[in-house]
Amino acid sequence: MTGFDRVHRFEDSHALAASYGPDWWIPIYRRAFPTLMSAVAIEQDGWAQRAGIDRLLTLACGRTFTVDEKIRTHDWPDVLLERWSDEKRKTPGWVQKPLACDLVAYAYAPAATCILLPVPALQRAWRQHGRQWIGLYGQRRAQNRGYTTISVPVPRGVLMQAIVEAMFVS
């Protein structure tokens, strides 16, 4: 007995994410980036996928953004920051591991809304406030086959304010 209501399976999570494909994401990206020219999915396992790159966006001016896409199937009032990908092995989750992407696109499927989180400021905010957030908001454990993932549910407004403050460097 694990003490968990359900066991998450990578295959199921991957299939769910794939079901929110370009028809779902592209309209959101077009609203965020009116000059979007292309949005190429990075689907093959490799260094880019492992470094958090799910999609490469290219704007008309030639500027590119690499994006890690996260999707939640409920409109929760928080952002679930993955602290440990594997609790036992202390494998850092996406909020604290080195990522190659520019943005985390954190979406809430029912409302078709998305928060674009700039990775450097997000991770700096985590370094500055993570311990406090754990104390205030607790941790959520998700049982997977052979490992447990630990995340911290931070209210959206709290996280966004911390990201803005993290952009000020003195």
Image (cartoon, rainbow, N blue to C red):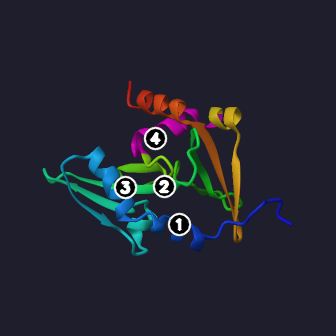
Which residue position is annotated with label 1? 16
> Given this view, does label 3 or label 1 mark the residue nearer the observer?
1
Do the CB atoms of the residues marked 3 and 2 lie less than 8 Å apart? no
Crowding around mark 1 (Cα neighbors within 10 Å: few <14, some 14 to 19, many 20+) is some
Crowding around mark 3 (Cα neighbors within 10 Å: few <14, some 14 to 19, many 20+) is many
Which residue position is annotated with label 4? 122
Do the CB atoms of the residues marked 2 and 4 lie less than 8 Å apart? no
Of pointers 1 and 2, the one earlier in the residue sequence = 1
Which residue position is annotated with label 2? 70
> Given this view, does label 3 or label 2 mark the residue nearer the observer?
2
Identity of the residue furthest to the right in this view: 1
Whether residue 100 is visible: no
> Given this view, does label 1 or label 2 mark the residue nearer the observer?
1
Give yes or no for residue 166 being in the magenta stretch.
no
43 versus 118 height, above or below: below
**Relative to the observer, which residue lies in front, 152 or 90?**
152
Dominant secondary structure of the residues highlighted in magenta in the image: helix
Q: Which residue is drawn at 67% across and 62% down?
A: 89
Residue 145 in the image, given as x and y percentages of width and height: 70, 71
Which residue position is annotated with label 3? 67
Q: Quadrant of the N terminus?
A: bottom right
143 versus 108 height, above or below: below
The disc labelled 3 sits on which kind of residue? Val
Mark pair 2, 4: CA separation = 14 Å
Mark pair 3, 1: CA separation = 18 Å
